[in-house]
Every structure is written in C-alpha cells, then in structure tokens.
Image (cartoon, rainbow, N blue to C red):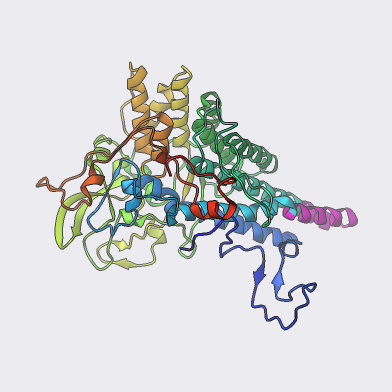
Amino acid sequence: MKKNSLYHITCGMILTVVFGLLSTSCDLTRKPTSSISLDESLETFQDAEAWNRGVYAQFRNRQGGSFVTIQERMGDCLNASDGFGNRGGDYYLWDEMSASDGGISTVYSYYYSTLKNVNKLLEGGYQHVIDRLQSEAAATDDKNAKASLEEEIEKTKEYLGSAYFARAFYFFNLLWRFSTPYNAATAKSDLGVPVVTVFNVSDQVKRGTVQEGYDQVFADLNEAEKYLKNAPNMPGSTQFNTDAITALRARAYLEMKDYENAYTEAQKLIKSNRYPLIEPTEKAIMNMWRYDKSSEFILVCPVSKTEGASSMGSYYGAYIDKTYHSPDWLPTQGFIDKFAENDIRTLAYFEKVTVYYNNIEFKDITIISKFRGNPNLATKTNDYYGPFPNGQHAPKIFRIAEDYLIAAEAAYFTNKDALTPLNALRVSRGLAPLSGISGKELLQEIKDERLRELALEGFRLFDLRRWGDPMNRMPYQTDKEGSFLFLNNSKGLTLKIAKDNPRFTFPIPQYDINVYGEENMPQNPGW
C-alpha cells in the first residue's frame, strides 16, 4: 500500500476524472477535453445523487480492517498464533512500531483523502445544485414540475447533512487515534490533528489543537442535524439520521470525559425506545452477529456479495479445502474467562475447533467467530462449512448496547444510577442483575461489561487509555496438555504496558511530517 499525504486521492471517488489525456499542444489556457472538474460534475440532482452514493461507499470502506484491528492487536485480548506470519506483529509488541508504519499511515491518509472529497461537497458543491434547483422551481408555473423540484431540493439538503455527518465522524476518529487525549484543562493548547475543512492543495497543513478538533466535530454534527431532521430513525437504518448524530455525540462526550453530556445523549436514545435490547436467546444473538439483524442497530452499512466491507477474517482462519482452522490471532484465556457460561454472547463470539500450526494439530482450541461473516454474503460453499465463512458482514456503526454502557459509565462518574443501564444490558445477555455494589467494584463491572459487549470492535485500547489503566496482556490459552507452543513470541504472551506509555496514542505519519515540516506537524511524544 503506497503511503501518502493528507491530499492522497483514493481510487473510487476522485475530484478529476481522467480517461486518458493525449496532449499535442502546450496551450495551458485550454481545458482538457477528456476530464471533468468537480464543479462540472455537480450540476444536476442526478449528479448530487451519484456523489451521495460515493460518500456512503467511502464511509463503508472506512470500517473494519485496519481501522479496527491495529488497536485490538495492541490490546490485552489477543495472542499471535504460530502461523500469523508477523502480520500485525509490530503492533502486538508495541516497541517495534514506528511513525513510518504503513498500516497506521494508511488509516490516517484514508481518513484525510475522504475528508478532501467531503470538504469539496460542503464548500459549495451541493449548495450549487440546491441553488440551481431553486432557480428552476421559481421559474416554472407547472405545479407538478415545481413539486418534483422541491422534492429534489429537500433530498439534496439531506445529502448535505450526510456530508456534514461523515466529516464529523472522520474528524472524531482522527482525534481518537492521533491526538493528545482530551483534557479540559489543556485542550486549547494540546496537539490535535489538522482541522482541514477547505479543499486547497496549495495550503500549508498544520496540526490544530484538541479543542479545535472537537469543536469542529460538534459544529458539523449541529449542521448535520439541521439537514437530516426528516431522515427516518429506525432499527437497522443504513442512512445517516439524527439518532446516529446523537450516538456519535455520546461517544465523543465519553471520550472527552464530559460525563454529564455523555449521559444525556445516551439516555435520549435509550428513552426513545426505538432500539429495544434483544431477548437473551441464541436466535437473537446469532441473528445479530451472523445475519446482521437486530432491533439494537442504530446505524449499519449496507453490503452485498459484490460490495462488501473490510473483513476481519484472520480471526476465524478457515480453509475452504480443509476441516481445520489456522487463524492469525487467538483469544487469550483471560479474555475467554471474562464470559460466564450463561452469557449468550459466547454462542456468537467463540467456537471450539481444531487448529493446525507448523504441522501440529491442536484440538478443542477456542477461536474467535464474532466476525466469521454472514452466510448470505458468502461467495463459496463446501460440504464442511456450507456457505464458506469469508468475514463479510454489515458494519455495525452504532448499537444501542454501547449507549447503555455509556450511560452506566457516565452515571458512575456523576453519582447517578449506574446499575439500571448496566443491569438492563446484562439481563439482555443472559446474566443476572447486580445489586448491592458500589465504588471500585461497580466500576470494574462496568469496565468488564464494556469489554464483553464491544469485544474486538476497536474500543479496548482507547478505553484503557481513558480509564488510565495499563495494558496487561491477559493469560494465554493452552491446549488440553497445557502446551502453548501454538502461540507466537514469548514476549508478546505476557506483555505489560504502563498506563502512561505515550504509545497509547498513534503517531502522525512520518510522510506528512516530511511534507509539511516539523514546525507545522510536530510528532506525538514517544515516537
């Protein structure tokens, strides 16, 4: 994967489409006849529809894969297997990571390349279409034509709202990974990320402050709310809407440790009753994680067999012509032990199988099946697996379960009732409600429930950082003879990282520091 700067253009949605320019002249005043500028590609409502599809397609492609697995490999729940081929080994061992790492640089550049496209739409691309449609509506006396134009105006405004939401989502995720963690006392001076909101390739990019970054997130969410007020809020929505806005606000406030606002936003979603927690049954949990169906989904990305998302199939490691598995990563025993026997999540999260490493067969080893994939999205089949697990599923951007966890944590830190939201989620997962606990014991239960519910979805490393907890890799899994020969690297098995280690925050890619200069793009401490 080629490393690039903030202005790297990804293939799939580019601002100038070139079909093959054959120049026989040096007249630089002439426009190329075989290219289309953004302004010319956003003239009609149909153009706006096409660009909106692009916004959603790129949003889907910024989920899963390295956007999740990097921080999970740095966390305490996984061990590298003997067959992992050092894929992600630098993250697993921490001290081998560098600011030139291709995976981290790709995450950074992909967010900014997409922001460039969204910024151009917000600079006036969609508004230009709205203005044209309004002029046409004002100029016609045909009632049917006017009604049709007014409908197109409202839809284009929704597209404008979607672009604002997407920009807020990308900026939050950049802040989450690459900026100094939010501290209200120092946020106005702490290093954030470049808050680039205008497309101009000649601009000198520099890092903003943490406060400027979060101010931009909330400003964009406020704008999105104006234009998405008519978007339907319902379970399983694939369209950005005001509930998704609320969910992102709750997530951002929690990261900022603004517990009052985090609690308020999470409770809005809980009290809406639009997203009831599932009943504690095998069918309900398997529908959620195997078939992408649940009343708990606030926002998901639509996928198909031909248009999928980045998968996390390395956890399952199935071979289509074999009856064994060889996953790159295995769950630690400490992680497995966090789940009680009656916790229905274990039915979807784990499987006991035969694994095969280095010509040695190990039976009854627990592997991760949470991201095995939706059978309806499988492209191959065989007698052993049926629809072959390929890791493809609908990315679940926001689930109401997260808001119960946000409400519980925020309630704990503001002396409110934390047990009610915590117990509601526990009961839904087949666990008994808790009573008579408080203080550190209650906080640990909240932390453990968050680990169980959001397992391997990209939250764990940053949760540890927010809580001020160290990263102590949990005890490793062994086979029935007590052997751990199928696990790779003894250092990684028992790695302990102090809570103040600066590498809980990702580095600014060295490429961007080289391009824009250290005075504009100073590196994060510890890199």
Counting the numbered discs, the total is 0
Place of residue 108 in the rendered image (x, y in percent of width and height, measured from the top left): 51, 51
Q: Quadrant of the C terminus?
A: top left
Q: Seen in the image, is 88 located left or right of residue 100? A: left
In this rendered view, identify the residue nearer to me: 489 or 81.
489
Place of residue 93 in the rendered image (x, y in percent of width and height, measured from the top left): 31, 47
370 to 386, vertically: above or below: above
In this rendered view, identify the residue nearer to me: 520 or 278.
520
In this rendered view, identify the residue nearer to me: 222 or 184.
184
Is 484 colored magenta in this rendering? no
186 to 172, vertically: above or below: above
Q: Is residue 73 visible?
A: yes
Place of residue 218 in the rendered image (x, y in percent of width and height, measured from the top left): 62, 36
Q: Main secondary structure of the magenta part?
A: helix
262 to 473, vertically: above or below: above
Residue at the bottom extreme of this rendering: 24
Residue 253 location, quadrant = top right
Place of residue 474 in the rendered image (x, y in percent of width and height, measured from the top left): 26, 38
Is 142 colored magenta in this rendering? yes
Q: Seen in the image, is 262 located left or right of residue 339? A: right
Which stretch is magenta? 125-150
Q: Residue at x 35, y 35 (%)?
A: 429
Q: Residue at x 57, y 52 (%)?
A: 112
Q: Residue at x 53, y 59 (%)?
A: 4
Q: Residue at x 45, y 36 (%)?
A: 402
Q: Is residue 428 visible?
A: no
Q: Seen in the image, is 403 located left or right of residue 153? A: left
Residue at the left extreme of this rendering: 481
